[in-house]
Image: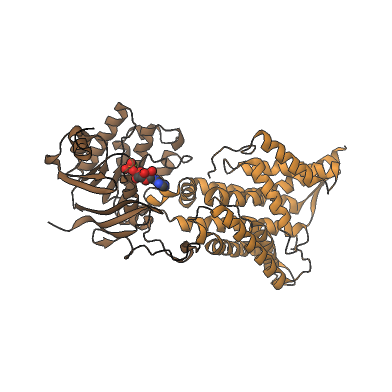
Amino acid sequence: MDPVTLFSIIKGGIVLGALYALMATGLSLVWTTLGIFNFAHGAFIALGAYVAWQFSATDAFGWPLALGIIATSLVMFAIGAFLHLTLVKPFERRSDVVLITVITTLAGSAILENVLLVIWGPRSKQIPKMAEGELAVGGFHLALSEIILLVLVLAILVGVGAFLRYSRPGRAMRAVSQNREAAQLLGLNVPMYFALVLGLSAVTAGLAGVFIGTIRFMNPAMGSEPLMKALIVVIFGGVARFSSPIYAAFIIGLLEAFSIYFVGLYWAPAVLFFTMIVVLLIKPEGLFGKYQRTL
Amino acid sequence: MSDPILSVRGLSSGYDPIKIFRNVDLTVAKGESIGIFGPNGHGKTTFLKTLSGLIDPWSGEIIFDGQRLNRPGERGSRKWRNFNYDAVTRRRMDPKQVARAGLIHVQQGNLLFPELTVAETLSISTTAARGRKGWSLAEVQSLFPRLVERNDHKIRFLSGGERQMVSVAAGLMSAPRLLILDEPTLGLSPKIRAELCAAILTVKETGLPIILIDQDVAFLEQIIDTLYLFDHGRISGRMSREEMPDHDGLMAILFGDQH
Ligand SMILES: Nc1ncnc2c1ncn2[C@@H]1O[C@H](COP(=O)(O)OP(=O)(O)O)[C@@H](O)[C@H]1O
Ligand SMILES: [Mg+2]
C-alpha cells in the first residue's frame, strides 16, 4: 500500500471515529445516567441535520453555518428534554423500565423520522460545507472542512468532559447517575438532571447529524446506520468512564476504514460485528469497561 | 412546650404489596433528640426512608415544623392492575422537598457516589441548604480531620468508617434542622467507631436535634432524650433517657425474659 492511500484511509478512519465518538458519547451518557438505551438517538441525528439545514441552507433561512449550529443545539436540547418527559419519565419507577423504554424510544424514533418526512420531504439535501479549500503536501490531501470537523468534535467532547468534571451541575449529574437515592437525599432535583442529560445527549447527536449532513446527502432515515455504529462503539468499548466510548469510537472508525479498503463496503459491517463479538467473548463488559455502569 | 419539630401520625408504608410498618405515632420536640431501638429487619430503616420520602407513605401524616410533607389522603386503591399509575399520579412525597425543608437523612450503609471524590461530594452537598446556614467545609473538616487527607480520593476507595464520615459531613453541610442517622456505627472498627461517636456527640452539643438508630445502648444514652422501641413494624414502647434500662433490659422488654 502506498503512503498516500494509507494516509487517506487513516484520515477517513479518524473522521469516522470523531463522528462515532460524538454519537456514542451521547448514547452512553443516557445509558449510564438513566439506565436506559435511547433508540431515538438515531432520529436525533437526522433531526439535527434537518434543523441545521433549515437554518443554514441557501434555499432556506440562509444563516451563517456557525449561527445555524448554535441555534440547532438549542432546538435539540429542548427536544431531548421534551422527549424525556414524554417517553421515559412516565415509566421511570417501573422495574421493567429498560424494556418499556426500548419500545417507547423506538416509537419516538419512528414518529420523528416521519415528522421529518412530512416537513422536509423525501428529497435528499445537503448542508453547506463548513469551509472550502484544502491543505495539500505532495500527494497528501486534507480538506479544510475535515480539519474544522475534527477540531470542533474535539472541542465539544472536551467541553462535555470538563462540564461533567468541574461544573457543579455536571458533578450533580454524575452523582445522580451513581446513586439516585443518595442524590435525592442531598436535595438534588433528579428528574431535572435526567431531562438535562437527555437534552445534552440530543445536542451531541444533533451536532453529529450536522457534521454528517455537511459530508453526505441527508434523508430522514440517515440516523439509523450511525445509531447502529454508535451501539457497536458503546458495547465494544464499555462505559466505565466518560472517555471509554471515545477511544472505542476511534478504534471502530479506523477498523471500518481499513475494512472498507480491504474487504469492501458490504462486508465492512460484518467485520465490525465480528470484532465486537470477539471482544465481548473475551471481555463481556467491553474493552475499557468495568462491571458497574457509572458516569 | 412549643410546637414539635417533627410530628408523625398514624404512618404506614412498605414495599408494595407488603406493609412493613403500620400506625406509627412519634413526636420530636424542638431541641429534643430521640433514639429508635429494635431488632434487625423490623422496619426501622423503612420507617426512616418513608420520613425522607424515598418511599411513598401509604397512610398517615408527616408534619415537619408545622409544614405537611406528604400529600393528604390514603394511597389510592389500584383498581386496574395493569394500569400504569405512575404515569398519571404524582408521588405522594418528594424527597428533594424534604431535604430542602431541613429534614436530612443519612442512610444506613450509604455507598454515596463511588466515582466521585470526597471533595466533589462535599461540593454538591450544600444543595439542600437553600439559604439556611449549614456547616461549612472547614467546620466538617475539623470535625472529621481524616477527610482532609482523603479529600481527593474517590469514595469507592474509602473504608466503611470514612464513607460514613463523608455521609454525615454531607448531611451537616445540607443545613439540617433535624438530622436522621441510621445505624451510623454499624460494622466499624472500635477506633473509627469511637471517633465517629465523639463527632456525633459534638454535633448534638451544637443543639441540633437528632433521630438516631443504633444498637449500642451506651451510645444512645449519650445522645438521646427519648427512646422509642420498634418491634414488628410498630412502636411498642417509649421511655425517657432516665428510664432506659441497659441492653439486656431492653432486649427483655422486646422479647420477654427468655431470650
Ligand atoms: N427494597 C426492599 N424491598 C422489599 N423488602 C425490603 C426492602 N428493603 C427491606 N425490605 C424488608 O423490609 C423489612 C424491614 O427492613 P428494614 O427496614 O431494613 O429493617 P431494620 O432497619 O429495622 O433492620 C425486612 O424484612 C426486609 O427484608
Ligand atoms: Mg436498618
Task: Give the image location of residue B130, x and y in percent.
Answer: 34, 56
Determine the residue located farthest toward the right in the rendered image.
Answer: A2
User: Residue B37 versus residue A67: which sits nearer the camera?
Assistant: B37
Task: Give the image location of residue B50, x and y in percent.
Answer: 34, 53
Residue A138 shown left or right of residue A279 in the figure: right
Q: Quadrant of residue A48?
A: bottom right
User: Residue A213 versus residue A93: which sits nearer the camera?
Assistant: A93
The image quadrant where one finds ligand 1 is top left
* Colour-to-chain, orange: A
Vertical comparison of B201 with B101: above or below: above
Tell me the residue at 46%/63% (across/down): B85
User: Residue B206 versus residue A94: which sits nearer the camera?
Assistant: A94
Tell me the residue at 30%/43% (across/down): B181
Tell me the residue at 46%/39% (across/down): B114
Q: Specify whether residue B215 is in view.
A: yes
* Colour-to-chain, brown: B
Task: Give the image location of residue A286, x and y in percent.
Answer: 63, 39
Residue B77 shown left or right of residue A37 in the figure: left
Task: Give the image location of residue A268, x and y in percent.
Answer: 80, 45
Vertical comparison of A40 with A180: above or below: below
User: Residue A114 versus residue B147: which sits nearer the camera?
Assistant: A114
Residue B71 shown left or right of residue A156 in the figure: left
